[in-house]
């Protein structure tokens, strides 16, 4: 029985898109899905199920940070049978070549989370994306007028306070951007033997301190949602 998702059996599709913000889940469902129905409102974490090109899909909020996402992903998989989970969210750019509105397809996600140490006390586990989803996302992005980067990101436990030394080391080792959820998503996908991917929009840049206004974030988010949907259903 699910503790944090009030959906009924059969309400959740096998394909789930995961924005962090529940109101983005609402907006994306009402914008991109046919006949979206709200299937969860517990604790204000909204989830909707509808159709995209004749395929059932759920768009469900995950909250901020790996602990929050892990609760919803665990229940979506174990209690509702989700098989393909795609995070659609924002990230802070690190690499100098990144521009605002660029899209990142996360191949791997490093982390410094205590969650990783709980499961792997003596190992730095390296979670990665599902290859077929990553390939499909790259192909979907190539058909659109959007600059796309494929590579490594960092999932952190903190939103602020990355020191200059740590940031420099991450950039030197090819880490493109930082966010707070993907490592947990990829780790859970590995554990449950399901497919997962993160498609992210660069909403701000840690080095240049540029940031998208709210209205521009929504327009850029639209590109990301369409890439994710086309990735899931070909």
Image: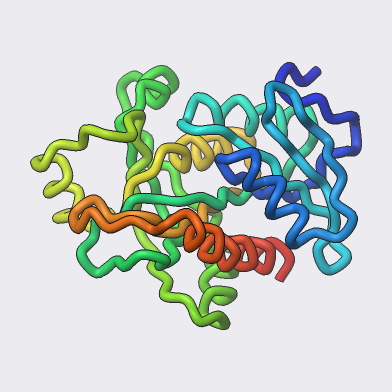
Horizontally, residue 218 falls left or right of residue 203, namely right
Q: In this picture, is 149 found above or below 210?
A: below
Q: In the figure, is residue 33 to the left or right of 183?
A: right
Q: Is residue 199 visible?
A: yes
Residue in the picture at 56% in, 76% down: 139
Q: Quadrant of residue 21?
A: top right
In percent of width and height, residue 28 lies at 69, 54
**Outermost residue toward the left?**
165
Q: Is residue 165 above or below residue 94?
A: above
**169 and 58: which one is in front?**
58
Q: Which of the 4 quarters of the picture holds residue 117?
A: top left
**Foreground residue, 57 or 220?**
220
Q: Residue at x 74, y 50 (%)?
A: 15
Q: Is residue 25 left or right of residue 132?
A: right
Residue 223, picture quadrant:
bottom right
In terms of depth relative to the viewer, which is nearer, 224 or 105? Answer: 224
| Rendering coords of residue 20 (x, y %) | 56, 40
- The residue at the point 20 percent across, 48 percent down is 170
Position of residue 187 measured from the top left corner of the image (x, y, whole percent): 50, 36
Q: Residue at x 69, y 51 (%)?
A: 27
Residue 176 in view of the camera: no
Name the one closer to the observer, 27 or 169. 27
Residue 195 % position (x, y): 62, 49
Quadrant housing the N terminus: top right
């Amino acid at each position: 029985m699910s503790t944090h998702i009030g959906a009924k059996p059969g309400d959740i599709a096998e394909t789930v898109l995961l924005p962090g913000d529940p109101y983005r889940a609402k907006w994306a469902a009402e914008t991109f899905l046919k006949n979206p129905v709200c299937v969860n409102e517990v604790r204000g974490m909204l989830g909707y199920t509808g159709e995209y090109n004749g395929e059932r899909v759920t768009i469900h909020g995950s909250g901020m940070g790996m602990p929050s996402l892990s609760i919803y992903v665990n229940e979506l998989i174990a209690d509702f049978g989700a098989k393909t989970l795609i995070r659609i969210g924002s990230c802070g750019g690190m690499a100098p070549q990144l521009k605002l509105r660029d899209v990142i397809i996360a191949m791997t996600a490093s982390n410094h989370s205590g969650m990783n140490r709980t499961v792997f006390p003596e190992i730095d586990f390296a979670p990665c994306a599902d290859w077929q989803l990553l390939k499909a996302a790259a192909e979907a992005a190539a058909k659109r007028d959007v600059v796309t980067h494929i590579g490594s990101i960092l999932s952190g436990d903190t939103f602020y306070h990355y020191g200059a030394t740590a940031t420099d080391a991450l950039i030197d080792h090819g880490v493109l951007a930082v966010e707070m959820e993907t490592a947990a998503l990829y780790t859970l996908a590995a554990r449950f033997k399901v497919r997962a991917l993160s498609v992210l929009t660069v909403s701000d840049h840690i080095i240049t301190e540029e940031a998208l206004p709210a209205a521009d974030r929504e327009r850029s988010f639209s590109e990301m949602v369409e890439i994710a949907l086309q990735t899931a259903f070909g």
